[in-house]
Amino acid sequence: MQSQGPRKLAAPNFLNQCASGCRKLFYSALIAIPLLSYPCVSHAFPKSNPAVKFEKAEKAPTIRKSPVRRQSVGCRFEKGVLEYKLRDGTVKKVEDLLERNETVLDLACHERYAFAITSTSLIVVPGRLEKEKSGNVEVILRFTKKDLREMHKKGIQSWAFADDRCYFLSKNGELTEVPVIVKEETIPVYRFPFDFRGSAMVFHRNLLFIAPAISKEKTKVMLVLKLSGTKANIRKIALEQDLKDADFYYSGQKLFFGIDGSDSVEIKIRGTEPSDVRLIAKKRK
C-alpha cells in the first residue's frame, strides 16, 4: 500500500485552549512536584475506573482501554488523587487534576509520563522533573491538560500512547496525533479509507497497530503504521482468522492480537519498519 501523508490542520479548539492554560501553568507552577511515559499499569497499581456521576444525567463518553503491559512503573486514581509509582519505588501523588463531574475513562503510564483520558480531557503528568528556563525564572512542568470534548463529540474509538505523544482514533476514520507539549500551531491528522468501528489500537516498539480495520472490500486487516511528521509509512496485513471480539494484549513482553487463552496471533517485529512485522498464529490452549 502506498504511503499516505497527513492533512495539516489548524490546531483544534482543544489544543488552542490548552496552549494558554499550559503557558499559565509553566509560569505559575514554581513549586516542583518531581514527576515526567511505556505501556502501562503494574499489578500493584491497577487501573481505576471511577463511577460516572453527572448532575444533569449526561451520558459519559466511552473509549476502548489501552492494553496493560507488565512493567516496573504503575499508576492509579484513588479518591481523586493520581498516584504514580516510578521505577525506583517513589510514589508521586498529584491532586486537583479533575474538575467537578469529570470522570476518568482510562489510565496508563510508563517511565516518562502518566496519561489519563477523562470525560473532558487528556491529562499528562511527568514522572521525572521537567523544567525550562525563562530568563532568570525556572519553570516547572507539573502537569498538562488538553481539552478532548470536540473529539468526544466525534466519538473516540480507541487511543494509544507513545513515548511523548498520544494517538486518538475517531469513528469517522481520522487519526489525530497529540504531542505532550504543543510547540506548533498545527498538528497532523491522518485519514484512512477503513471502517474503524470496533478497532483497537496500540503503540509498540515505535510502530502503531490498528485492528481490525475493515476495508472497502469488507475484508479485515491489521494496519501497521510508522508516522513521522508529514510522512506515513503504512502496511496492511490480512487477518485470516475471524478473531471475534479480539483485542491487543500483552503476555510477558510479547504483544498479541486476539483473545487471551483462545485464538490469537503473535506480533513479531524484526526491524524498524512496518514491512518487518509478521503475524504468527498462536495455538488455542
Image (cartoon, rainbow, N blue to C red):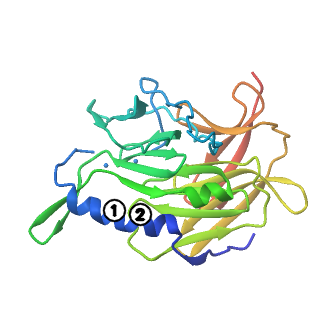
Q: Position of residue 181 (x, y in %)?
A: 38, 63
Name which residue lies at 22% across and 44% down. Answer: 33
| Label 2 Cα crowd, 10 Å radius (few <14 / some 14-19 / many 20+) | some
Give the position of the C terminus as an image quadrant: top right
Q: Nearer the viewer, residue 168 or 241?
A: 168
- Residue 271 badge: none
In the depicted view, which residue is nearer to us: 197 or 20?
20
Q: Residue furthest front?
A: 56
Residue drawn at 50 percent across, 41 percent down:
101
Q: Does residue 213 appear left or right of residue 54 in this picture?
A: right
Residue plotted at (71% across, 24% down): 261
Whole-percent x, y for residue 115 in the image: 45, 46
Helix, strand or loop under label 1: helix
Q: Quadrant of residue 81?
A: top left
Q: Is residue 131 above or below residue 255?
A: below
91 over 231 or under it: above or below = above
The residue beneath circle 2 is 18
Q: Say which element carries label 2.
A: helix
Disc 1 to disc 2, C-alpha distance = 6 Å
Whether the residues at callouts 1 and 2 have beta carbons within 8 Å, the answer is: yes
Can you identify the residue that label 1 sits on?
Answer: 22
Q: Amino acid at mark 2?
A: Cys
Q: Does any portion of residue 164 appear in the rendered image?
A: no
Q: Give the residue type at disc 1.
A: Cys
Quadrant in which the N terminus is drawn: bottom right
Vertical position of residue 282 compared to residue 176: above or below: above
Locate residue 17, reporting x and y percent.
44, 66
